[in-house]
Image: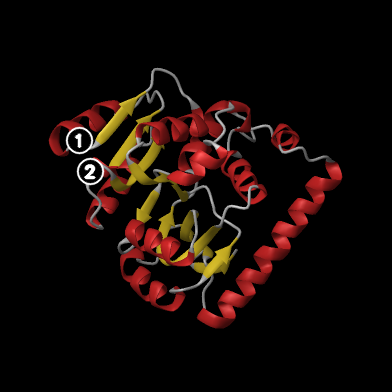
């Protein structure tokens, strides 16, 4: 039987955040059966806790014997969610706002988007997300950044996989898989965007930070390799980055002028900064 969506959540350790994420989604009406957690060979309590939840409430859970990376887990989940119209690729270190998934997909369908992300509030959760989110959504409803989505949460319509394929599974991309997919979508003329009708709080790349600390690496991916995969030399990279920053500033200024907030905000030292 087909379903509107399947949420795919790759995880590697950090069970505390995964549990908060799952509880948050279910509090917003998401059925456990519409979630697929892909465990990339965790060594903490994650496998046992996922097995408990799967047995108790029907949560979808899959444990890999090796770490396939984010792109590998995304593609694995998308292939397994073949009966769903949308595949929502989600980080585990997030909290969902009111009706987050359905509101995001409703906005995408109303605006003709085939890949869509929600608004994002990042950083310390010292402001009371549960109370802040409804007021934020009232101000941001109908706002959109067309031509952009982010890797914390992005929903992909089934037709996009059919048109351009799945996220890249190359482990050397580590952390750049979302940008690679964004560029592929834009080059294919696929309508993508970020919408203000849904919002998530993102604690901030918890798994990646833990992996960097453990390995001592500054980056989990090869940035130059990423750009070479896109066919971009030095000059093209510079132009790409400058255009991204120029567009980001324009969006942020316009959103703040109209709504008093932006679709991407960072919380530091008790203050908001638009990004």
Q: Position of residue 123 (x, y in %)?
A: 48, 56
Q: Residue furthest top?
A: 65
Quarter occupied by the C terminus: bottom right
- Name the residue nearer the viewer: 269 or 257: 257
The residue depicted at 44 percent of the width and 78 percent of the height is 139
Q: Position of residue 24 (x, y in %)?
A: 28, 53
Counting labels gives 2
Give the colouring mode of the picture.
Answer: secondary structure
Residue carrying label 1: 53
Numbered circle sitting on residue 78: none
- Name the residue nearer the viewer: 218 or 5: 5
- Crowding around mark 2 (Cα neighbors within 10 Å: few <14, some 14 to 19, many 20+) is many
Numbered circle sitting on residue 32: 2
Asked which quadrant contains residue 28, the reply is bottom left
Residue 258 left/right relative to 66: right
Residue 27 left/right relative to 143: left
Quarter occupied by the N terminus: top left
């Amino acid at each position: 039987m087909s379903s509107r969506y399947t949420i795919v959540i790759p995880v590697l350790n950090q069970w505390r955040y995964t549990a908060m994420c799952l509880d948050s989604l279910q509090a917003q009406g998401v059925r456990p059966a519409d979630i697929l957690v892909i465990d990339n060979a965790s060594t903490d309590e994650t496998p046992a806790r996922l097995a408990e939840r799967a047995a108790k409430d029907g949560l979808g859970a899959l444990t890999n014997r090796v770490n396939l990376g984010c792109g590998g887990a995304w593609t694995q989940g998308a292939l397994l969610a073949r009966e769903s119209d949308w595949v929502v690729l989600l980080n585990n270190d997030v909290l969902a706002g009111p009706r987050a998934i359905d509101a995001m997909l409703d906005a995408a369908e109303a605006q003709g988007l085939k890949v869509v992300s929600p608004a994002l509030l990042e950083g310390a959760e010292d402001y009371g997300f549960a109370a802040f989110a409804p007021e934020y959504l009232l101000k941001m409803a109908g706002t959109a950044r067309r031509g952009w989505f982010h890797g914390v949460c992005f929903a992909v319509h089934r037709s996009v996989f059919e048109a351009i394929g799945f996220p890249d599974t190359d482990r050397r991309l580590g952390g750049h898989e979302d940008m690679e997919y964004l560029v592929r979508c834009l080059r294919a003329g696929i309508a993508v965007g970020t919408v203000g009708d849904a919002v998530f709080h993102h604690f901030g790349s918890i798994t990646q930070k833990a992996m960097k600390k453990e390995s001592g690496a500054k980056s989990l991916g090869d940035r130059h390799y990423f750009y070479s995969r896109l066919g971009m030399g030095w000059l093209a990279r510079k132009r790409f980055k400058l255009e991204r920053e120029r567009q980001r500033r324009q969006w942020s200024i316009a959103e703040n002028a109209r709504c008093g907030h932006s679709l991407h905000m960072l919380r530091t030292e008790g203050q908001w900064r638009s990004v």
